[in-house]
Image (cartoon, coloured by chain):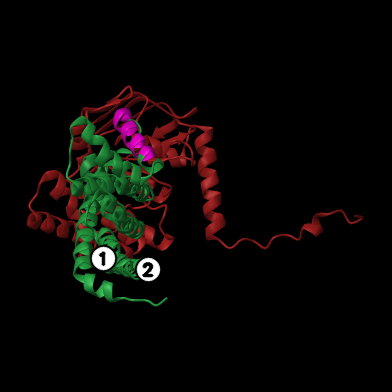
Chain colours: A red, B green
Amino acid sequence: MIEIRNVYKSFGSTEVLKDVSLTVQPSRTTVVIGPSGSGKSTLLRCCNVLETADRGEIRINGRSIIKDGTPLPDKELNALRAETGMVFQSFNLFPHMTTVENVMRAPVVVRRMARAEARALAMDLLRKVGLGDKADVYPSTLSGGQKQRAAIARALAMKPKVMLFDEPTSALDPELVGEVLQVMKTLAEEGMTMMVVTHEMGFAREVADTVVVMADGRIVESGPPDQIFTNPTQERTRGFLRALVDGHLAGARPQPAAPDPLAALPDDH
Amino acid sequence: MTLDFAPVWEGLPELLKGAVVTIEVTAAAFLLSGVLGLLVGIIRLNPARRFLYGLATGYVAFIRGTPLLVQLFLLFFGLPQFGILLPATLCGVIGLGIYSGSYVSEVVRGAIQSLDRGQMEAARSLGMSYREAMWEVVLPQAFRRMLPPLGNETIALIKNSALVSLLTIDDVMREGQRIISTSFRALEVYLAVAVIYFILTNAATQVLRVIERRMTVERG
């Protein structure tokens, strides 16, 4: 469970989070959407203290991870981070380790798990995300979708109770997005508590229990996906969704031939 | 005026003995500079730890801003005034190590800072402590980037080690001077000394190149 209470965060003089409160119930998936610069990634990173929230409190599984700018002491923070999986937009796999090493390293280092046991665990997870045959290659040889699935396996190896996804498909070629979303969907169905920042509206609609719309560092609106997508109450939400749909259509459909601009001019021009 | 290399051949055993001393002093100083450079380089990543950061920054500024010869003389001729009388070889190793360490620390710092921040973040997000993340994730990657500049440092270290001859250490330089003092064949002997240094610096370059290549191949 993730509880965010009245969180503020500034970078220098720019306030990027303004009094944000949000709860992700156990075994639920909350998807955070909104235009870029709305603070949604910062909010997610605050849940792991990769960014330090200036004010307010964030609790993970009932334990306060940061309160009014003071994070937990290092040791307890590390323990709590170990239980909070994080998936990054840019994967951040360790390039000097094979795929299976990437997955088993943290259990060995942090949990002092025996290597053989960690390897077996890692192999299970790699098979689960469809990468059983890629265990002994280096990440540089994987496709973007494979990298992200390996990164998800790496996070799962710590047996997290909560998963944070920071635009997990934004760096992927369009044809590779589906395989990553499928893995995330499976996780959600298995009862993982997830907070996902994404631009994938199909995923939000299909998998989210709650959709949160952010803009300018505030939560504009939140509710079940049906309500947000078909009957949004806020003008900002409507504007954002409309822009998104237009963008999609512009990309996906052949455009009608552009009218000749000269034809629009009056005849006597 | 003819060249006469006879004193070189006669003195070759002494020159080689001196070369061994040069290698020993350089190798010990190299280890010291590596440890020192790693520590100082990592400390200099984080200005928030003010005392350590200030100390490390002062060290780098002072050592890089003063001549190595003065530093060596401070150790060898200066410290005895406080009753600290270190053996010449130890002075040479410490002096060279401290000097080279200041440069290595900048190599270490630069290599670490050139890595993507996401690597540290990913390691920390898995629950690793700062130290674990450094050791497991950041340093192994940074080390590869350190190798080429470290090669330059090693070459500089070998060449700079000639200065320890002035601390009465019998390195290849001092052995050469000793042969000259009886044979008066400065050109021939110094040429021989130069060749020996050239061989040493080249050998070091080759070793580092092999390490570099091996680390690149390993990754596939």
| Residue found at x 52% / y 34% | A236
The residue mark sitting in front, 2 or 1, is 2
Where's residue B146, x and y in %? 33, 55
Q: Is residue A216 left or right of residue B45?
A: right
Element under disc 2 = helix
Work out which quarter of the rendered image holds the C terminus of chain B and state it: bottom left
Where's residue A251, x and y in %? 54, 58
Q: Amino acid at mark 1?
A: Ile
Work out which quarter of the rendered image holds the N terminus of chain B and state it: bottom left
Chain letter for the residue marked with disc 2 in the picture: B
Which residue was labeled with disc 1? B211
Is residue B35 in view from this perspective? no
Which residue was labeled with disc 2? B187
- Which quadrant of the figure has residue A173? bottom left
Q: Amino acid at mark 2?
A: Leu
Instruction: Point out the stretch of residues depicted in magenta.
Output: B49-62
- Which quadrant of the figure has residue B76? top left
Is residue B32 in view from this perspective? yes
N-terminal label among 2 and 1: 2
Query: Label 2: how many residues lie within 10 Å, few (<14), some (14-19) or many (20+)?
Result: few
Residues at marks 2 and 1 on the same chain: yes
For the residues marked 2 and 1, what is the alpha-carbon distance in whole angstroms? 36 Å
